Image (cartoon, rainbow, N blue to C red):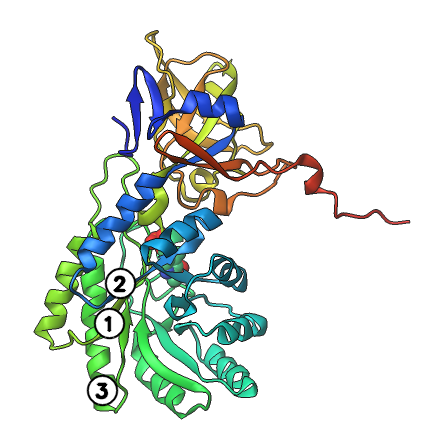
Amino acid sequence: MTVAPHFKFNNGVLHAEDLSLAELADTYDTPLYVYSRQALRDAWEAYRIASEGRDVLVCYGMKANSNLAVLNEFKNLGSGFDIVSGGELARVLAVGADPAKVVFSGVGKQVWEMKAALEAGVKCFNVESEAELTRLSEVAQAMGKVAPVSLRVNPDVDAKTHPYISTGLKENKFGIAIEKAVQVYQHAATLPGLNIVGLDCHIGSQITEVSPYLDALDKLIALIKTLASHGIHLKHLDLGGGIGIRYTDEKPLTPSDLLDQVFKVLRQHQLESLQIVLEPGRSLVGNAGVLLTRVEYLKHNEAKNFAIVDAAMNDLVRPTLYDAWHSVEAVQPRQEESSVYDIVGPICESGDWLARDRKLALQQGDLLAVMSAGAYAFTMASQYNTRPRAAEVIVDGATAHLVRPREALESLYSSETVLK
Ligand SMILES: *Cc1c(COP(=O)(O)O)cnc(C)c1O
């Protein structure tokens, strides 16, 4: 049993769908990101079923995994996109996504990014401050355009997740304090070049319970009613992303858990005419991928056993950044006696670890799959230590598609110049 249904053992070898990870390592070398197409589709299907018969727009929070093949898959399934930069806008336009299904989030939108999004005609700007509101009004006016806006409010709820991925508390940099929101909306209504269309929040990531969403929803509904009494009527309510996945033994809420509850509350308040927007990232891709890596050396210190592998913190920074747990599976588990290992990379940092205290039977050359590496893995990868970023493969049944080749070593420095 692994945490991910499309990564299973078959004759003692871990497979992605119908392909052996050992074969993939032989073909494409390691480290290697391997994604399952069916896992992407299944994750989408959970949102589709939960949305059936309801006015819901799912905008994939693409910073989780922005490979064009992944974006194209979700686009074809009907997804919109939540973008957080002009770069992400360029990616969704590159796959021919419908800008009318794109929402633009982020606390630091630059003028060029606003221009590009207005030019493209995005569905909504999720505005996070009064200063941003002023800038957006000026940019839109200068272009002779009207910017559709939501305010991202900070409902001050505890998402009960890691501090670095909790975004809905007062002390976070995100959003506008909910107590100030009415005033800012009223100000927005007076600014030229803006059209108020919605209300937005995003309270955190890897949330496993429905209660933080419902706490936020209560506050948002109260705000929507106050705004209506001031003549400000909204078309949509964006509840952000944040649904968690199973990394070990979590039992996170499902899209149906969330939307059933949300629509129940909306009905109670006669607000069913609101469109609900969701921005799921991790829950659409997290368990659709693994990071495949090979053991280079085993090292036994007095205090610790280390498996030094060819993947590192530049390929998967979540462990060292968030103290995150990723399951680690031997691709061809050995029957021999196991030891307790720290799985570490070759980078010159003590923070370069992928997993700690794992019981495994290992030998040099063995392959390991770091599970749940479909989200916030490649997109957070760097070239630290002049390590080319690893290749990405999508498996579809018994076929592998290389959707991003391993970076060529020279490409890491070929555009650099030396001084005369
Ligand atoms: C990161 C992010 C998301 C996606 O979050 P997940 O936890 O991956 O679902 C959605 N909306 C905003 C504004 C974000 O910053």
Mark earlier in primary sequence (1, 2)? 2
Residue 322 shown left or right of residue 232 in the figure: right
CA gap between label 3 and label 2 equals 23 Å
151 is higher (above) or lower (below) than 232: above
- Where residue 34 appears, as percent x and y from the top left, is 43, 34
Secondary structure beneath label 2? loop
Structural crowding at the residue carrying mark 2, measured as other residues with C-alpha within 10 Å and reported as few (<14), some (14–19) or many (≥20): many
Q: Amino acid at mark 1?
A: Gln
389 is higher (above) or lower (below) than 107: above
- Where residue 135 appears, as percent x and y from the top left, is 52, 81
Please state which of the two labelled residues, at mark 3 or mark 2, is closer to the viewer. 3
Mark earlier in primary sequence (1, 3)? 3
Q: Is residue 416 visible?
A: yes
CA gap between label 1 and label 2 equals 22 Å
- Where residue 337 appears, as percent x and y from the top left, is 34, 8
Residue 218 shown left or right of residue 159 in the figure: left
Residue found 35% across the figure and 11% down from its top = 334
Which of 339 and 117 lies nearest the eye of the viewer?
117
Q: Which residue is mark 2?
A: 157
Q: Is mark 2 within 8 Å of ligand 1?
A: no
Q: Which residue is mark 1?
A: 275
Q: Amino acid at mark 2?
A: Val
Disc 1 + disc 2, Cβ < 8 Å: no
Mark earlier in primary sequence (3, 2)? 2
Secondary structure beneath label 3? helix
* Image quarter of the N terminus: top left
